[in-house]
Image (tube, rainbow, N blue to C red):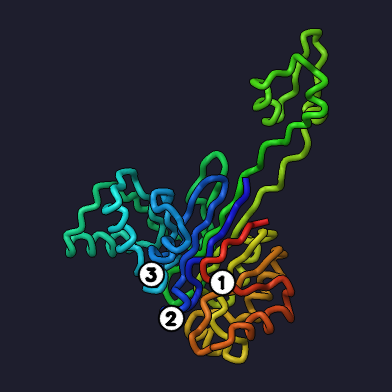
Amino acid sequence: MSSYLTILGFNSAIPTINTSPTAQFLEMEDRHFLIDCGEGTQVQLRKAKVRFSKINHIFISHLHGDHCFGLPGLIASFRLLGRDKPLNVYGPEGIKEMLETIFRITETYRGFEIIYHELNKNYSEKIYEDNRVEVFTIPLNHRIYCNGYIFKEKEKERHLNMSEISKYSEIETCDYQNIKNGKDFELSDGYVLKNEKLTTEPSPPISYAFCSDTRYLEDVIPIIKNVNVLYHESTFLHNLKEMADYTGHTTAFEAAQIAKAANVKKLILGHFSNRYGDLSVFTDEARQIFPATFLPKALETIKLE
């Protein structure tokens, strides 16, 4: 089962005709996660043909408007579409107060439960886990409390070696799951078929790291080590490093340094200042350090591998 990332929005604070503030839709092991929810996110979800009912977990990096102002409207639309199952919202302390205040003042009736997971730790912690996927925070250094997130597939099942299995009539379809889980198979005469003979190695697990607004921060490197794809903000080019530091942001050069040090396979830049008309200058700068650097495209779906 493949994992896919859809870029819904990637520019900084101000929406433009062709781009939207930060929001991403991640499909991993048949789970569906929304990462940040800037203004206009639900329109972008519509354009991407994402069924709203699939989204049960929303991860907000921080409470600056370009990362969360789309959330009240999206939740209101959930209600209008008849949602009745719980919605999990992960974000900084204060996100519950923000949303509940808006719902109270606007007399917005939801009809479903919102389960808030408010975050305040300055170290990486596991905040979500099921039998296939786990999610950890990536503490960042912005002007206000901010986390990135790393999404990891768990170790996958082994692949059946059907050319070998077909040699033994005693092995039935109902035995396949145990074999995929790594168990040996005992024949009626007592002979044990080792699992290594009946299976091949599983596909390697996929990981994706989302580093939202942050100053250059080497602390993230061990957390995101060896991820398949890293999204890292790069609001400015390196000739404006002083401005980046002052405003709590990173340069393209610095994002590439992080990617190289963490040995990631692919780097996607984002959160560009509107002062730049031609975004290719970001990859020009970053590829000097990390050649596997790419620009996002609105509504582009990327296979994580």
Disc 1: which residue = 297
**Vertical arrangement, residue 186 with respect to residue 292, above or below:** above
* Amino acid under disc 3: Gly
Quarter of the figure with the C terminus: bottom right
> Residues at badges 2 and 1 in contact (C-beta under 8 Å)?
no
Disc 3: which residue = 40
What residue do we see at 53% from left, 58% from top? Answer: 124
Image quadrant in which you'd find residue 155: top right
* Amino acid under disc 1: Lys
Quarter of the figure with the N terminus: top right
> Residues at badges 3 and 2 in contact (C-beta under 8 Å)?
no
Return the mark for residue 254. Answer: none
What residue do we see at 63% from left, 83% from top? Answer: 280
Q: CA distance from mark 1 to mark 3?
A: 16 Å
Image quadrant in which you'd find residue 288: bottom right
What residue do we see at 75% from left, 14% from top? Answer: 170
- Nearest to N terminus: mark 2 or mark 1: 2
- For mark 2, does the 10 Å Cα neighbourhood hold few (<14), some (14 to 19), or many (20 or more) residues? few
Q: Secondary structure at mark 1?
A: loop
Disc 2: which residue = 16
- Nearest to N terminus: mark 3 or mark 2: 2
The spot of residue 31 in percent (x, y) is 51, 47
The spot of residue 239 in percent (x, y) is 61, 91
